[in-house]
């Protein structure tokens, strides 16, 4: 069993879950994920490892409360246990001295870009962080990001902080960065990553995305996470989760993500607590 050290809501429906998982913490690298179960025989879901401490054995994941399993995770308290935290899984993010790297995140992706930004900063890169949300009250982990970023940009759809709009402002932000941008890394919902890639495509900037796919085992055996990249079949769990966003078949990915929407809705309704 995996002990729960802390579970807090850091923004509406966004939760910070800290677990004691020494084996995972010792081996984790930026960009990898774990497979969690909220209960025995429960659904297995992939969550990015957003922070960890190899000495204390702690790992932190950030998730959005949106379905039956994440509802159960959101009820966890200090001292509870969960049956599974398998990992680290997936390939680490490619890290090098690229020059100027822009990392953009939305929702749970805000936390996911943190360990990558931290590692790239330690390699001497100039770090630009862009975070987007519907409104400023949905931002979190800002102090952590400011410590590793040379420049922060905020985008809110209601204009309460930073630029008003959506990730389509990414091109404008890049145009205003002295010396340009050498690499872009996007994390968040599939729409944010897809739309961000459309902003960087005409600029010719290599753009890496961390795909959010359906997944069961996370080790390449089930094939549920199959995606098409540059015309070839790939498994997001073992070939990714990081890919060149300009090569991803986003329409196919979106359709596959919705394949079990009806079943997920039924499960959510039947698992809701009685009032």
Image (cartoon, rainbow, N blue to C red):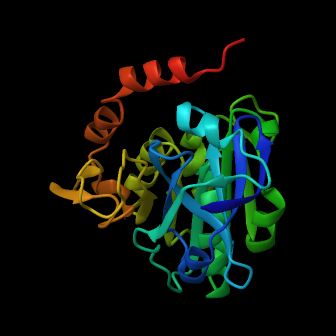
Judge by depth and name the residue closer to the eye, 180 or 155: 155
Q: Is residue 65 visible in this depiction of the protein?
A: no
Q: Is residue 22 visible in this depiction of the protein?
A: yes
Judge whether 195 appears above or below 209 on screen: above
Question: In the rendered image, which quarter is residue 152 located in?
Answer: bottom right
Residue at horizontal 51 percent and vertical 42 percent from the top: 189
Residue at horizontal 62 percent and vertical 62 percent from the top: 2
Judge whether 130 appears above or below 159 on screen: below
Side (left or right) of 198 relative to 137: left
Judge whether 41 appears above or below 247 on screen: above
Q: Give residue 98's position: percent from left, percent from top.
A: 51, 81
Question: In the rendered image, which quarter is residue 236 located in?
Answer: bottom left
Side (left or right) of 140 relative to 210: right
Judge whether 77 appears above or below 12 on screen: below
Q: Give residue 241's position: percent from left, percent from top.
A: 39, 61
Judge by depth and name the residue closer to the eye, 185 or 223: 223
Q: Give residue 168's position: percent from left, percent from top.
A: 54, 41
Q: Give residue 82's position: percent from left, percent from top.
A: 61, 53
Question: Which quadrant of the figure contains the N terminus?
Answer: bottom right
Side (left or right) of 234 relative to 191: left
Outermost residue to the top: 275
Question: Which quadrant of the figure contains the C terminus?
Answer: top right
Residue at horizontal 58 percent and vertical 32 percent from the top: 66
Question: In the rendered image, which quarter is residue 101 located in?
Answer: bottom right
Judge by depth and name the residue closer to the eye, 152 or 34: 34
């Amino acid at each position: 069993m995996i002990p729960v050290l802390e579970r807090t809501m850091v923004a509406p429906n966004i939760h910070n879950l800290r677990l004691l998982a020494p084996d995972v913490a010792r081996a984790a690298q930026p960009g990898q994920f774990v497979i969690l179960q909220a209960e025995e025989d429960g659904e297995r879901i992939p969550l990015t490892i957003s922070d960890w401490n190899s000495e204390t054995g702690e790992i932190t994941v950030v998730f959005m409360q949106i379905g039956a399993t994440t509802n159960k995770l959101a009820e966890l308290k200090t001292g509870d246990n969960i049956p599974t935290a398998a990992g680290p899984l997936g390939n680490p993010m490619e890290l090098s001295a690229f020059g100027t790297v822009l990392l953009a995140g939305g929702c749970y992706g805000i936390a996911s870009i943190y360990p990558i930004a931290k590692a790239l900063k330690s390699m001497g890169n100039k770090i630009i962080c862009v975070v987007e949300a519907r409104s400023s009250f949905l931002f979190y982990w800002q102090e952590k990001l400011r410590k590793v970023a040379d420049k922060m940009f905020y985008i809110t759809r209601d204009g309460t902080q930073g630029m008003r709009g959506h990730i389509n402002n990414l091109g404008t932000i890049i145009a205003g960065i002295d010396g340009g941008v050498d690499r872009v890394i996007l994390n968040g919902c599939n729409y944010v990553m897809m739309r961000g890639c459309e902003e960087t495509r005409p600029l010719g900037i290599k753009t890496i995305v961390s795909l959010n796919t359906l997944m069961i085992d996370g080790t390449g055996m089930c094939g549920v996470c199959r995606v098409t990249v540059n015309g070839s079949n790939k498994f997001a769990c073992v070939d990714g989760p990081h890919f060149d966003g300009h090569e991803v078949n986003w329409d196919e990915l979106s359709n596959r993500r919705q394949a079990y929407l009806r079943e997920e809705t039924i499960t959510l309704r039947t698992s809701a607590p009685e009032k």
